[in-house]
Image (cartoon, coloured by chain):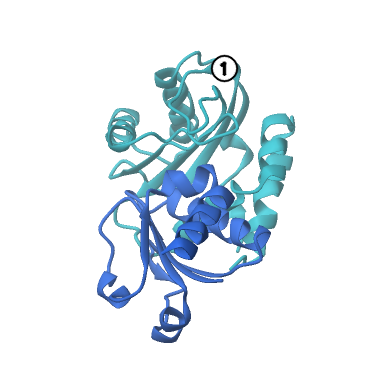
Amino acid sequence: MDINKILNANRVKLAMTASNKEEAIAELTDLLYDDGAISSKEAFIHDVWLREAEGSTGFENHIAIPHGKSAAVKQTTLAIGRTRRDIEWETLDGSQVRCIILFAVRLEDQNTTHIRLLSQVASALADDEVIDQLLDESDPEKIIQLFSQYAETDLC
Amino acid sequence: MKIVCVAACTAGIAHTYIAREKLIKGAKALNYDIKVETQGTIGTENELSPEDIAAADVVILAVDIKIKGEERFKGKPVVRVKTEIVIKSPTKFLEKVTHSLAQA
């Protein structure tokens, strides 16, 4: 499957200015809005916070994976960001967050290859080498390639 | 050791699939045989067959929500755990499961 269906360099920002969780979610939402993936920032952010209320989306190794299923999403996609500063987030290992992967899922789109691609991105996060590169790589295209490799190989 | 699992999380988008990968990696490290069914937004994938379940030593439910088909595991040893536990320390968790099976 082709990761470019859901991810492009406009949705990757490797020098985010956010200094907290609210700002980080808003900053990545801006990317998706500016790239035409969502129709309303406010509605989408509201739905992301609904998910946050159900339980922490902090992962481990400085990664967080907030996600929103929302009527404001026009195409199922994701945005990837890395912050200049460490961000407080409720993570599994108590680490502060430096890389945020925001999933945006369309409500009516419950059964497409796009969600399958998102699940493959999530699967890739179980790999320590992927995490290392996510925290270090400075070229957005390389980050996309990283997930692209995972999307092409069927792991299970 | 043969293990069958079901992974499912609240939104069915991210944690389900990370948990699956972590369980598979953890089982590989311990040389266990594992099959993981996922119940996510895209529905059920890699569904466990009656034969898979019959052959399993233990059933692990790495789930944050109510899952479909739990009655399939009646009569089997079932360990229920939150997805975040298997995501955080899959190998340690699997070792603990086998340890408590050996004692049972």
> Can you give x and y, in whole percent of width and height, for residue A23 in the image?
43, 18
Do we see residue B14 in this rendering?
Answer: no
Q: Quadrant of the image for the N terminus of chain A?
A: bottom right
Q: Position of residue B101 (x, y in %)?
A: 45, 64
Please say if A23 is above or below A115.
above
Among the chains pictured, the one given cyan colouring is: A
Q: Which residue sits furthest bottom?
A: B51
Q: Quadrant of residue B72?
A: bottom left
The residue that disc 1 covers is A86
Chain B, hue in figure: blue
* In the foreground, B57 or B73: B57
| Residue at 59% in and 35% down | A10
Position of A43 with respect to B1 (left or right) is left
Query: Relative to residue A116, is residue A70 depicted above or below?
Result: above
- Could you tell me which quadrant the C terminus of chain A lies in? bottom right
Return the chain for callout 1: A
Check disc 1: other Cα within 10 Å, few if <14, some if 14-19, many if 20+.
Answer: some
Picture quarter containing residue A45?
top left
Residue A80 figure quarter: top right
Residue found at the very far front of the displayed protein:
B103
